[in-house]
Image: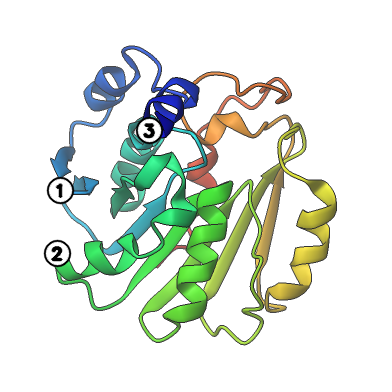
Amino acid sequence: GFSLYVRIQSYPVEEGAIEVALEQSPDVSLAEKFGYYMIEPVESERSLIYYPGGLVYPDSYIPNALDFAQEYQVTVYIAKVPFNAAIFGIWMGDWIAYREQLESFWVGGHSLGGIAACRYTNNNKDTVQGLLLQGSYCDRDISNFMGDIISVMGDNDQIINRDNYEQAKSNLPDTVKIIEIEGLNHSAFGSYGLQKGDGENEYQGNPWGIVQRIH
């Protein structure tokens, strides 16, 4: 019953969004694997393990990830987390790294997925090269983390708890790159429509596309 409730409440990918993105990203392949999606450009220079937002189907992030992978030569692994809640699937980072034989990589996530990525980073500081937060924050103190951290936030985001977001900045090192995008809401990091309670999205670009510092 709980599983059915989760499926009903979760946001699916917009119809046709993946097909359009595949047509626009001819140099990128998409594969569904056991527990995750793999988005791989012809030439890949780095890897990103990605945790989806809470109650959002993981394939909702494929369109933006396809565009991002093609432009910046990043292989993206989108985790399929239990109950569409990344907090229950933090271990998926280890699973994907093991399956793909990744020795070092970035981790990232949207909303609740960003919190999961932060917790994974906190427990794997030797293998995580960097952390990407999208409409999210760290609820663990990783101020001594030596890798790169990029935090992307939209000023039309009406979902995130702003007080928690501001307070959690102290959990990040001084080297964090914080990017706030005018007109961007919470939902536009994926392709699942407008999340209930969110502001309208006025940003026309791919919000993944401003993180070219990933290396």
Q: Characterize the local packing of mark 1: few (<14), some (14-19) or many (20 or more) Cα atoms within 10 angstroms.
A: few
Q: Residues within 10 Å of mark 2 (few under 14, many from 20)?
A: few
Front residue of 162 and 129:
162
Q: Nearer the viewer, residue 19 or 119?
A: 119
Which residue is painted at 39% across and 30% down in the image?
Answer: 60
In the rendering, at what x and y percent does residue 75 appear? 26, 54
Above or below 213: residue 200: above
Q: Which mark is residue 150?
A: none
Of the 4 image quadrants, the one containing the N terminus is: top left
Which residue in the structure is indicated by mark 1? 34
* In-image side of 60 versus 102 (left or right): right
Q: Mark 2 falls on what kind of element?
A: helix
Marks 2 and 3, how far apart in space?
26 Å
Residue located farthest toward the top when viewing the structure as drawn: 15
> Does 209 sit left or right of 43 as displayed?
right
Closer to the chain start, of discs 1 and 2, is 1
Name the residue beneath numbered marker 2.
Answer: 99
The percent coordinates of residue 98 (x first, y second) are: 18, 70
- The quadrant of the rendering that contains the C terminus is bottom left
Q: Are marks 2 and 3 in contact (CB under 8 Å)?
A: no
Q: Quadrant of residue 12?
A: top left
Quickly name the residue at label 3.
3
- 38 left or right of 192? left
